Amino acid sequence: MGTTTINGVPAHPLWVHVVVILVPLSALALVVCAAWPAAMRRAGVVLPLLALAGLASVPLATDAGEWLQERVPETAAVERHTEMGDELLPWSVAIFVLALVLWLLHRGVLSRFLPSGSGGGSGSGGASGPGAASGSSTVSGSGGASGSAGGLASSRVILVVGTALALIVGAGAVVEVYRIGDSGAKAVWHGF
């Protein structure tokens, strides 16, 4: 069993199904966790791990697809599908990077790089404390780690920007998954 065949059968359809499940699921989880800090507290390290699994599945699907492309009749539809398949990797990388940043913000690891009082700093109490930042949960908390109006404003900006980025990247990835899948289905079923 390899990454291109399983028991002598092309593995591309299997990897495609993994991508079709994990990438949109990662995108949805990213948006929910970015917009809802309580969800990020519950998700914890699962979010970046899910995004990493989705990211890892993309090159497996494209590698198996390129292997399969060499063994099927070459058509314009197959060529277009193969080219489109390479377009998903940057979206998957973006989902993983945002998920990792969101998790690190939640853990307070990135707080020293943020403006003073924007969350996750002193008094955050770790990953599950009420002031832990996910971009940041201080919006729904008691006014941020420093309790200042500037810290609350900064945490709201981070929350809004993080949610907007998650929506853009998540939507882009889901659209790409659909477009690539549609082109693959047309390549396979054209003429039937």
Image (spheres, helix red, strand yellow):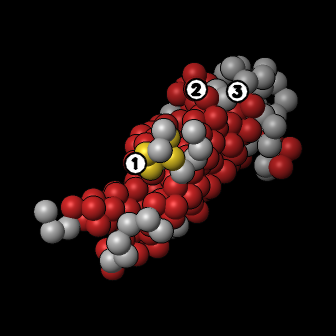
Residue for badge 2 = 43
Q: Label 1 belongs to which residue?
A: 13
Q: Nearer the viewer, mark 1 or mark 2?
A: 1
Quadrant for residue 74, please give it.
Answer: bottom left
Give how far apart the Cα atoms at labels 1 and 2 are.
29 Å
Let me know if residue 33 appears in the view: yes
Dot 1 surroundings within 10 Å: few (below 14), some, or many (20 or more)?
Answer: few
Asked where in the image residue 143 lies, by quadrant, the reply is top right
Which numbered disc, 1 or 2, marks the residue that appears first in the sequence?
1
Amino acid type of disc 2?
Ala
Marks 2 and 3 in Cβ contact (< 8 Å): no
The kind of residue on which mark 3 rests is Gly
> Of residues 150 and 98, which is closer to you in this image?
98
> Can you give x and y, in whole percent of width and height, for residue 14 in the image?
43, 43
- Give the SS element for disc 2: helix
- Residue positioned most to the front: 8
The one of 60 and 67 positioned closer to us in this rendering = 67
